[in-house]
Amino acid sequence: MTNPRSLQTYRGNCHCGAVRFEIETDFPELTMCDCSICRRKNALMVKVHESRFRLLAGADALTEYRFHTMTARHYFCSVCGIYPFHRKRVTPDHLGINVHCLDGFDPAGIPVRQAVGAAMP
């Protein structure tokens, strides 16, 4: 089955607007992860290749958190604390984008896959 959505550009930001970014995606699926940090932040994510991500503002406002293997890089706004995206552990050339940070985006109708992060070695 092919995805009926076409590649589109979306803008997003943290709550205070210090961190702003842009992505291109066709939303093939959304993911929720059950690892210890994703479970707590309860983010709904879309996977985007780094070439389809642009940080527009706020590099200086981002703070980074790493744990366990220290591979995945979780970014948070140091002003408002919102998690807008992370660099993925298994596919480090991709980012997981928190779709709740995207302007005017409605996730209804997009399949959600449960990612199993808690069982990763």
Image (cartoon, helix red, strand yellow):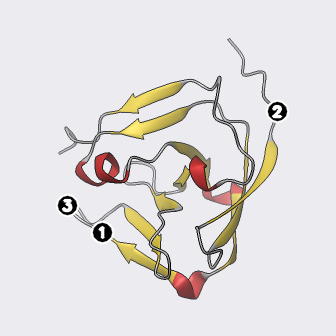
What residue is shown at x 30% (from left), y 34% (from top)? 116
Q: CA distance from mark 2 to mark 1?
A: 33 Å
The quarter of the picture where residue 115 lies is top left
Q: Are marks 2 and 1 in contact (CB under 8 Å)?
A: no
* Disc with the residue nearer the chain's start (2 vs 1): 2
Q: Mark 1 belongs to which amino acid? A: Arg
**Which residue lies most toward the top here?**
1
- The x, y position of residue 60, in whole percent, is 56, 88
Asked if 79 appears above or below 6 in the picture, the reply is below
- Return the residue at label 2: 6
- The x, y position of residue 43, in whole percent, is 45, 48
Asked if 40 appears above or below 44 in the picture, the reply is below
- The x, y position of residue 73, in whole percent, is 39, 66
Q: CA distance from mark 3 to mark 2?
A: 36 Å
Q: Are marks 3 and 1 in contact (CB under 8 Å)?
A: no
Which dot marks residue 68?
Answer: 3
- Which residue is nearer to you in this view: 19 or 68? 19
Q: Mark 3 belongs to which amino acid? A: His
What residue is shown at x 62% (from left), y 26% (from top)? 110
Which dot marks residue 80?
Answer: none
* Disc with the residue nearer the chain's start (3 vs 2): 2
- Return the residue at label 1: 66
- Which residue is nearer to you in this view: 32 or 71? 32
Helix, strand or loop at disc 3?
loop
